[in-house]
Amino acid sequence: MISQVFILSSKGDHLIYKDFRGEATTDAINVFYQMVTALPGDQPPVVMTREGLHFIHIRQGGLYCVATTTTNASPFTIIEFLNRLAALIKDYCGSLSEKSVRMNFALIYEMLDEMLDYGYIQTTSTDILKNFIQTEAVSSKPFSLFDLSNVGLFGAETQQSRVTPSASASRPIMSSRGDQVRKNEIFVDVVERLTVVIGANGVLMKVDIQGEIKVKCYLPTCSEMRIGLNEEFSVGKSQQRGYGAAVRVDECNFHQAVRLDEFDSYRILKICPSQGEQTVMQYQLCDDLPSAPPFQLFPTVERDKSDRLLIYLKLRCDLPPKSMSQELSSPDQRAELQPSSKAVHWEISRFPGGAQLSALFKLEVPGLSAASLLEVGPVSMSFELPKHTCTGLQIRFLRLTPVQPNPSPRWVRYVTHSDSYTIRI
């Protein structure tokens, strides 16, 4: 059972606080934030304990969603509840950010009252909660390309969303009473997270791809949705399917509502989507990369005559170049030395496929020796690749039944994120 639920900003501001059982005081909020900020690194443990009070949290949209309990409750159940809470906030408020939570705090409190009863979980279903939620959502300001502080998968919160009407995908699923026009749209995102370790000799040492297919539905009624994947899609070490390039994953799992009677033969997923966001399919590919890594680094580290450390980096993007010539313009770059982490931060705002960039860093390092050169590295990269999947997974078609007289707009997008991309020097 859950004692408390609260949501904090990345700076520790109290946004939402709900006490269900009176087993802990409000000081638990400050205790949790002090424990999180005191830990080294950016990945604090999901479960922490202080004086018999267990803190279980997730971090999404730059916010901490936290639940506390004094009992020996299953942490996986509470983590799943927090993930559903974050998804419901996105469904009802349009996006998960500090601003949307502040603007819709009354709606979130009403949501928590319906989801939990004396700390016991009652429901996390979007369809069931629609019958009880009366508070209307307050939409945040329209999307701006100059404000990318809140990064998300759906809607206007990522740069790749410029290919779609961004404001449509970040609106609440329940239209306000004054909204006369309601668009019945559906969004499908294929999202992959890439973990790569490349040795100093350029050989791949570790590859892991975690992918998922997410659906955000604004359709009031839809009896069935059929999602067609690559005909060559295979799971495990099975034989290649079809006549094109093989698209293989090691394992995959599906949402409980997905019907698979046509999956083995035709690679079609059938689901009756409810309004809101849901993960239809998750998949994983380990120790294999169907194509070349998206980035290759050619480093040179040496010491000059003035005993300065010289780091020369040549970075190449091995993705196919765009056909439009204006996309090949030289991107803006910025670099700075971060003494606290003893690292050089090189930021590239845009890096088109087929391009190559280089940088030379000259550093004054006290007591620099030949042995010090061996301590340089590794290089860690963080990036986002729109319109690209490393596995090659594609959506062949997206069909809705019954066929309506006015076809609903359907949007399919692809994006690859770097979960951990490390290159040894």
Image (cartoon, rainbow, N blue to C red):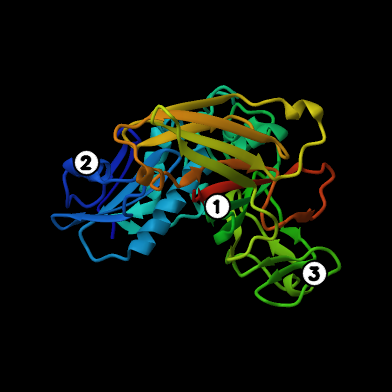
Q: Position of residue 352 (x, y in %)?
A: 69, 35
Picture residue at 47% right of the left edge, 38% below the top? 302
Outermost residue on the bottom side: it is 238
- Figure quadrant of the N terminus: bottom left
Q: What residue type is labelled 3?
A: Tyr
Q: Which of marks 2 and 1 is nearer the N terminus?
A: 2
Vertical relation: 288 (above or below) 394 = below
Helix, strand or loop at label 3? It is helix
Category of crowding for the residue at label 1, using alpha-carbon neighbours closer than 10 angstroms: few (below 14), some (14–19), many (at least 20): few
Q: Nearer the viewer, mark 3 or mark 1?
A: 3
Between the C-alphas of marks 3 and 1, the distance is 30 Å
Category of crowding for the residue at label 2, using alpha-carbon neighbours closer than 10 angstroms: few (below 14), some (14–19), many (at least 20): few
Between the C-alphas of marks 2 and 3, the distance is 53 Å
Helix, strand or loop at label 1? It is helix
In the rendered image, which residue does mark 1 sit on? 127
In the rendered image, which residue does mark 3 sit on? 266
| Circle 2/circle 1 CB separation < 8 Å | no
Picture residue at 54% right of the left edge, 42% below the top? 299
Picture residue at 80% right of the left edge, 65% below the top? 231
| Circle 2/circle 3 CB separation < 8 Å | no
Q: What residue type is labelled 2?
A: Gln
Judging depth in this view, the residue of 267 and 330 nearest the camera is 330
Q: Residue 34 carries which label?
A: 2
Left or right, 131 with respect to 14, comes to right
